[in-house]
Image (tube, rainbow, N blue to C red):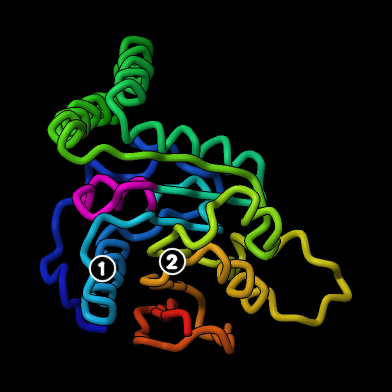
Amino acid sequence: MQYKYVKEQLDYSDFSSGRVFYSLSGHPAFPVRLASEIFQRCVANRKTIYNISTPCTLYDPCCGAAYHLSILAYLHREHIQEVIGSDIDEKAVALASQNLGLLGVAGLDKRISEISKMLELYNKDSHKDALASGYILKNRISAFAQEHPLITRVFQASATDSKAIINNVKAKSVDIVFTDIPYGQHSHWHGLNSSELVDPLWLMLNALIDILSTSSIVAIVSDKQQKVSHKGFQRVEQFQIGKRRVVILKPI
């Protein structure tokens, strides 16, 4: 895969998972450069297909700790007006709430205070680096706060539960879905009946239909074995990078 938008490998160390942002044990963080590339492709496709470039509502139904959602809101704040995350895992949702809280000055102040206390106790270089990154992120957020206000929220639900999703997300309100679905040894689908023969990925796409806006784009990251297919969606583009396959769709 050739990068179209993030052509250079930049220094993303301030965004490292576990430094300022909270990490979810056993779940590797999504690559920042790739997340930025995928999101910018979604924005570009929304502009090309619908001729719309207004700030979007961004949603991830498998958000985990909401790490890549939070990173995108830092890197592309001008393109985002609301960030919504959901996950079936209660612990993940709690951590996602903390990470999304870091998109505001109050949340960062609290995190900087936590890091400062750890630095006082242990005086580790990693804590010094984290504190420096915390202030860098705070300056960035402070600059965006008034010009690009942001709403964030997270709730607990299965990505395949259409009733739970529509109860928490307004109908036809989501402009971009960006989700890294369960695969591999670190994550798998939960909440499905063992006798259920329907593909969980199909169920997730089906659950998204009612909440998607009339100018929406859906980006799904999976492994190469999972087939992204639903009669309600049309493929816009697809590419592979390493073990990941990225499929970008639009509703029909």
Position of 175 relative to 107 (above/below): below
* Residue stretch rendered in magenta on the structure: 69-82
Secondary structure beneath dot 1 equals helix
User: Does residue 240 show up?
Assistant: yes
State the residue at coordinates (46%, 55%). 28
Q: Is residue 99 left or right of residue 143?
A: right
Residue 36 rendering spot, x and y as whole percentages: 26, 62
Comparing 52 with 44, the one in front is: 52
Q: Is residue 112 left or right of residue 135?
A: right
Comparing 70 with 166, the one in front is: 166
Residue flagged by tag 1: what amino acid is it?
Answer: Val
Tell me which numbered mark, 2 or 1, is placed earlier along the sequence: 1
State the residue at coordinates (44%, 60%). 174
Q: Which residue is mark 2?
A: 213
Image disc number at residue 198: none
Residue 45 rendering spot, x and y as whole percentages: 27, 77
Label 2 – label 1 distance at C-alpha: 14 Å
Residue flagged by tag 2: what amino acid is it?
Answer: Ser
Position of 143 relative to 119 (above/below): below
Image disc number at residue 43: 1
Which quadrant of the structure image shows residue 38? bottom left
**Residue 171 drawn in magenta:** no
* Number of marks: 2
**Residue 70 drawn in magenta:** yes
Q: Are marks 2 and 1 in contact (CB under 8 Å)?
A: no
